Amino acid sequence: CRIIEGKPPVGFTYELFLDENAEKISKSRGNGLSVEEWLRYAPPESLSMFMYQKPRAAKRLYFDVIPRNVDDYLTHLEKFPSLEDDKKLDSPAWHIHSGHPPHEDSHLSFNVLLNLANVCHSEDKSVLWHFISRYRPDATPESAPILDNLVEYAINYYRDFVKPAKQYRAASDVEKKALEDLAKTLTGLDKDADASAIQTEVYQIGKNHPFEDLKSWFKALYEILLGQSQGPRMGSFIALYGVQESIDLINRAVAGEDLST
């Protein structure tokens, strides 16, 4: 093009995908993740979100990145209507949906749904919707199709990845006292307390007890109550699962009961 004084096409440099250990994906080694496998656990838009971000970087492609990309997509979708017109063009949601992102008011993060399935020990869609309907009475499978599809994806992901990896541990003496304080605080909450108010109380309890830092407090909550090292915002989770149900769960943990059943 340059020789004939024409305009060359815009070039694009990209990197190949890596596995969870930052090694090149090889068909012979089977350390990859296929499109079909991704779409068993998450909507196509989440895969588009993964592709949209950092297109020139060598990105790690493995099962653990799926929940984060689902939630990144949902965050952009939720924020889109409030953006100024000139800012909408910068949103991944605009590009993923060719300028016409769908709107749905009933948003719950994918991680919260995974943890709801986890604590309920349920692979039954209707059981999860029982809790969702209490938290969002306006939401139904018919009125919130995006959320309804996410429930199905969450059940698949929970069944294949979360459930086999769950590993609960007993609370230490310090943690037991903090958990007892949390249960007592939740008991005294106003019945209309929202997720933000609950999160503030959980945060304050962590500050009131001799944890090394707040990260250690939340990590203890996840490991003791959910059987995993990471988890959702506890305020959102407690609001969704139910305050009384959360109190019962905490009391079981303090009593040393097996939470895996």
Image (cartoon, rainbow, N blue to C red):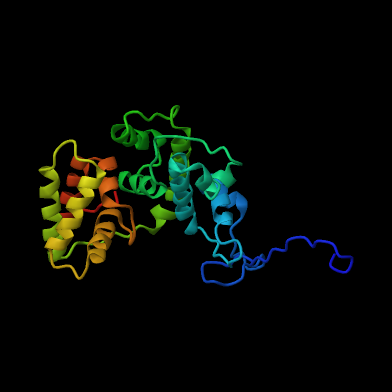
126 versus 108 height, above or below: above
Q: Residue at x 51, y 67 (%)?
A: 20
- Image quadrant holding the N terminus, namely bottom right
Can the viewer see residue 232? yes
Q: Residue at x 72, y 63 (%)?
A: 11
Residue 175 on image: x %, y %: 16, 62
Q: Is residue 80 left or right of residue 256?
A: right
On the image, which quarter does residue 204 sit in?
bottom left
Q: Is residue 158 left or right of residue 231?
A: right
Can the viewer see residue 256? no
On the image, which quarter does residue 217 sit in?
bottom left
Instruction: Identify the residue at the far front of this view.
Output: 5
Q: Foreground residue, 176 or 236?
A: 236
Q: How many marks?
A: 0
58 versus 105 height, above or below: below
Q: Foreground residue, 54 or 5?
A: 5
Instruction: Identify the residue at the far right of this view.
Output: 4
Q: Foreground residue, 216 or 53?
A: 53
Q: Residue at x 64, y 66 (%)?
A: 16
Residue 6 on image: x %, y %: 84, 62
Residue 208 on image: x %, y %: 12, 61
Residue 209 on image: x %, y %: 12, 64
Q: Is residue 41 left or right of residue 201?
A: right
Q: Is residue 133 left or right of residue 51?
A: left
Q: Residue at x 84, y 67 (%)?
A: 2
